[in-house]
Amino acid sequence: MQGGDEVIVHEDEEGRIVVEKAVTTDDLAEGYRVRSEQMADLASELEGVSAEADSTLGDVPEWES
């Protein structure tokens, strides 16, 4: 937190006063942007694994019932 930040003040379950920085729309947007980049990086990293799995799906044996 920095001077001038909006805060939320409340009591926790044990009666202690808690001061938290309020979450702004900009904070949420930044979080979603970072998460999107992380998911894109992961998808890129796993692309080869997914392609390999797709190419070998037909190799699963047919189990008799």
Image (tube, helix red, strand yellow):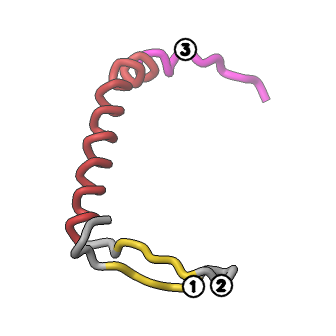
Q: Is residue 23 above or below residue 32?
A: below
Residue visible at 45% across and 76% down in the picture? 19
> Mark 1 sits on what residue?
11
How crowded pointer 2 is (Cα within 10 Å; few <14, some 14-19, many 20+) is rated as few
> Mark 3 sits on what residue?
59
The answer to whether the residue labelled 3 contacts the one labelled 1, judged by CB atoms less than 8 Å apart, is no
Residue visible at 28% across and 79% down in the picture? 6
Amino acid carrying label 3: it is Asp
How crowded pointer 1 is (Cα within 10 Å; few <14, some 14-19, many 20+) is rated as few
The answer to whether the residue labelled 2 contacts the one labelled 1, judged by CB atoms less than 8 Å apart, is yes
Label 2 SS: loop
Tell me the distance, in whole angstroms, between the alpha carbons under discs 3 and 1. Answer: 59 Å
Give the extent of the magenta segment. 55-65
Residue visible at 20% across and 66% down in the picture? 26
Which part of the image, by quadrant, shows the C terminus? top right
54 magenta-colored: no
How crowded pointer 3 is (Cα within 10 Å; few <14, some 14-19, many 20+) is rated as few
Tell me the distance, in whole angstroms, between the alpha carbons under discs 2 and 1. Answer: 5 Å
> Mark 2 sits on what residue?
15
Amino acid carrying label 1: it is Glu
Amino acid carrying label 2: it is Gly
